[in-house]
Image (cartoon, rainbow, N blue to C red):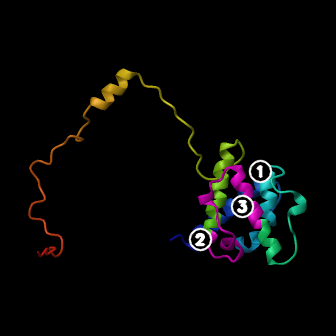
Amino acid sequence: MASKGADLEQENEILDWMETIMGEKLPRGNFGEDLKNGVILCRFINKLAPDSIPEKKIATSGGGFKLRENVERFQKAIVKYGVPQEEIFVTVDLFEKKNLKQVRLTLLALGRIAQNKGQPGIGPKMSDENKRNFSEEQIRQGRDAQIGLQAGSNKGASQAGINMGKQRMIQD
């Protein structure tokens, strides 16, 4: 499990990246609390992918329901941007601060996708396709070859006599 220091370091790295994209300073008090209402997230995705969320639909005030809609709009926008659904946090992870680690992982996934689209990103760069064309001769050689110990020898070793726990008694 990551320490609080590692979490804080990762949060600051994410906020630094978001500031670079947005061109403005973000609050640094409490990661979950600062992002909770979804306003920063909505403005952020609009910088990465302009007009992802219409400005008039971003609720800056109101009850919990209105502010949760901001987070949901952000989630829908990043799916359209290319973040896989399985890497996206659920609204309560952020809104009720139940799983801020998943929120961080979602933002890191967004950074990875941004890098692939030629924008400043965060985290490891995703690999590009590395297509190879082999001749029929090369394919045949690879298929027919035995490499090292693939066909190896166990030098007479066997599992005879090995007992793992109690034997199973089968009765007729």
In space, the residues marked 2 and 1 are separated at their CA atoms by: 28 Å
Q: Earlier in the sequence, mark 2 or mark 3?
A: 2
Residue 99 is inside the magenta segment:
yes
Q: Residue at x 83, y 72 (%)?
A: 66
Q: Residue at x 69, y 48 (%)?
A: 114
Q: Which residue is mark 1?
A: 48
Res. 139 image quadrant: top left
Residue 64, position as x, y percentages in the image: 80, 77
What residue span does the magenta drawing correspond to?
71-100
Query: Closer to the N terminus: mark 1 or mark 3?
Result: 1
Question: Marks 2 and 1: which is nearer the front?
Answer: 1
Q: Amino acid at mark 1?
A: Leu
Which residue lies under the disc numbered 3? 75
* Left or right: 29 in relation to 139: right
- In the picture, residue 152 is in which quadrant? top left
The secondary structure that most of the magenta stretch takes on is helix
Please give the label number shown on residue 127. none
Q: Label 1 to label 3, Cα distance in Å?
A: 14 Å
78 left or right of 61?
left
- Is the residue under label 3 in contact with that under label 2 (CB below 8 Å)? no
Amino acid carrying mark 3 in the image: Gln
Q: CA separation, marks 2 and 3?
A: 27 Å
Where 134 falls versus 10 (above or below)? above
Q: Secondary structure at mark 3?
A: helix
Please name the amino acid that badge 2 sits on.
Gly
Circle 1 Cα neighbour tier, 10 Å, few/some/many (<14 / 14–19 / ≥20): many
Q: Residue at x 58, y 50 (%)?
A: 124
Reading the image, the residue beneath label 2 is: 5
Q: Around disc 2, counting alpha carbons within 10 Å, would you say few (fewer than 14), some (14 to 19), or many (20 or more)?
A: few
